[in-house]
Image (tube, grey):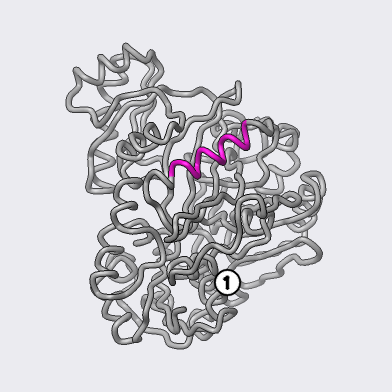
């Protein structure tokens, strides 16, 4: 087992990893930018090292500075968290070249699955259903027109790299296909330094259901059940829950098995998430793999009774997974909401600033994962996530009731947050019935007074 781990991240996930390490008796080195100097979670690490100015490109994305900190801190491994360099195959390779273990998949597996076209080919090899579309990256406009005619409009133009909805366009006819190809490629090149795009059949009103997996270096891979992440705004998740509502048991089981088949075929190790779209007839289609721990991992932890971050560390250290698939339960209902420093009534404009008052809910079944505190100043340089409120109760109805109560108890002053929107969502009849999809919010919500 490792004696000392560097945490190559900040905020909520950095604190989560530090706590897991402390529970395991492992020392930690926390890196931080000048904007995060003085953050309380840094005091929980064994050592803290500044790696640069506030901008992520000058600090948390600087591979050479993180490796230097790891060498100065005398660590055996680096945990990348999520975001920043967590899915950077080059970073994973550099870590291992420097004889520092990267707590995640190999750079080869990450590269194969990080590219959506390559991942789709692996899925087909593993006999996992994929969305009909082009066989690879589009080479020119003429090819795109031919493929679209074959699979039928509407089609979805997607960037092969990245995520978060960047480099993605819906085309309903040839004219919108031509313009969408150019704009999607330009956006993808700007965001990911990779302008490659491909086509898929556009599935109307799909659900987004993903499967949490973890695999060791001894040929074992298991799933920790699925999460429904359909409630989104502009491809950014608002609410995640497990088990997925209104998903037939047979479909659920086959989807989870398909996820395990795929990662085994890819030679993938450590934690990851296999994402699917589910249509109105409960057909599921593979879309991508997130080769890292995800924001919503607590949902899977609570229903399965595991600590995913500790298991990531154990797998990276060469240990065998402690359970077989048949021994992993799915108990109760878990729901997570992301609380962001944003103003939903003002086009979700970021709301950095000082938290002047903070009262966090508690009670049975309530978990709050966050690095913020009363008096903390939310910086303007990073993602606006300030915390995750997670509920775990015996039934979905009880989870909803506890979530409503917890949101009503929550007080954050000094900044705007998404709490008012979340309160409205948990009073929504369609959501309570499980009748939502990835476009539901855009179609039905006004953001100024609830549902349209």
Residue to which mark 1 is pinned: 372
Magenta stretch: includes residue 252: yes
Q: Position of residue 236 (x, y in %)?
A: 50, 45
Drawn side of residue 313 relative to residue 189, left or right: right
Q: Position of residue 438 (x, y in %)?
A: 55, 34
Q: Secondary structure at mark 1?
A: loop
Q: Quadrant of residue 35?
A: bottom left
Identify the residue at image location x=36%, y=56%. 87
Work out whether residue 369 or residue 151 is closer to the camera in this orientation and state it: 151
Q: Position of residue 117 (x, y in %)?
A: 31, 36
Residue 78 appears anywhere in the view: yes
Magenta stretch: includes residue 348: no
Work out whether residue 349 or residue 160 is closer to the camera in this orientation and state it: 160
Q: Quadrant of residue 341?
A: bottom right
* Residues drawn in magenta: 251-262
Residue 417 appears anywhere in the view: no
Identify the image quadrant of the C terminus.
top right
Identify the residue at image location x=32%, y=26%. 199
Identify the residue at image location x=50%, y=36%. 276
Drawn side of residue 387 relative to residue 130, left or right: right
- Marks counted in the figure total 1
Q: Residue furthest front?
A: 218
Work out whether residue 296 or residue 54 is closer to the camera in this orientation and state it: 296
Q: Quadrant of residue 252?
A: top right
The image shows residue 306, relative to residue 139, as above or below, that is: below
Drawn side of residue 365 relative to residue 193, left or right: right
The image shows residue 153, relative to residue 426, as above or below, that is: above
Identify the residue at image location x=61%, y=59%. 323
Q: Position of residue 158 (x, y in %)?
A: 34, 33
Per the picture, the main secondary structure of the magenta-coloured stretch is: helix
The image shows residue 70, relative to residue 303, as above or below, that is: below
Work out whether residue 394 or residue 218 is closer to the camera in this orientation and state it: 218
């Amino acid at each position: 087992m490792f004696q000392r781990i560097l945490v190559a991240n900040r905020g909520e996930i950095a604190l989560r990893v530090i706590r897991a390490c402390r529970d395991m008796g492992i020392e930690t080195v926390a890196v931080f930018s000048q904007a995060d100097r003085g953050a309380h979670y840094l005091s929980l690490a064994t050592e803290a090292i500044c790696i640069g100015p506030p901008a992520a490109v000058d600090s948390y994305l600087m591979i050479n500075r993180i490796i230097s900190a790891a060498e100065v801190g005398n660590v055996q491994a680096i945990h990348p968290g999520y975001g920043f360099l967590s899915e950077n195959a080059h970073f994973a390779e550099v870590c291992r070249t420097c004889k520092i273990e990267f707590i995640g998949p190999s750079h080869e597996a990450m590269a194969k699955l990080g590219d959506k076209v390559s991942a789709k080919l692996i899925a087909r090899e593993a006999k996992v259903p994929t969305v009909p579309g082009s066989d690879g990256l589009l080479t020119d406009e003429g090819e795109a027109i031919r493929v679209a005619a074959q699979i039928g409009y509407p089609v979805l133009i997607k960037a092969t790299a990245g995520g978060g909805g960047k480099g993605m366009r819906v085309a309903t006819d040839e004219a919108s296909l031509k313009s969408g190809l150019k704009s999607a490629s330009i956006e993808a090149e700007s965001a990911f330094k990779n302008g490659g795009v491909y086509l898929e059949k556009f599935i109307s009103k799909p659900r987004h259901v993903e499967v949490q997996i973890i695999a060791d270096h001894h040929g074992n891979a298991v799933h920790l059940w699925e999460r429904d992440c359909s409630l989104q705004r502009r491809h950014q998740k608002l609410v995640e829950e497990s088990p997925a509502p209104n998903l037939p048991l047979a479909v659920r089981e086959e989807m989870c098995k398909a996820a395990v088949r795929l990662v085994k075929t890819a030679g993938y190790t450590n934690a990851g998430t296999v994402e699917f779209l589910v249509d109105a007839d409960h057909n599921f289609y593979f879309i991508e793999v997130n080769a890292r721990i995800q924001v919503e991992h607590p949902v899977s932890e609570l229903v399965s009774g595991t600590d995913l971050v500790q298991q990531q560390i154990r797998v990276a250290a060469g240990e065998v997974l402690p359970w077989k698939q048949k021994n992993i339960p799915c108990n109760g209902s878990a729901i997570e909401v992301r609380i962001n420093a944003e103003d939903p009534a003002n086009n979700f404009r970021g709301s950095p600033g000082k938290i002047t008052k903070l009262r966090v809910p508690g009670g049975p079944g309530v978990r709050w994962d966050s690095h913020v505190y009363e008096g903390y100043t939310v910086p303007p340089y990073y993602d606006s996530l300030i915390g995750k409120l997670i509920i775990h109760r015996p039934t979905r109805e009880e989870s909803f009731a506890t979530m409503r109560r917890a949101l009503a108890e929550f007080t954050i002053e000094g900044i705007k947050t998404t709490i008012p929107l979340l309160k409205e969502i948990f009073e929504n009849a369609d959501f309570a019935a499980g009748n939502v999809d990835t476009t539901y919010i855009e179609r039905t919500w006004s953001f100024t007074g609830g549902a349209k």
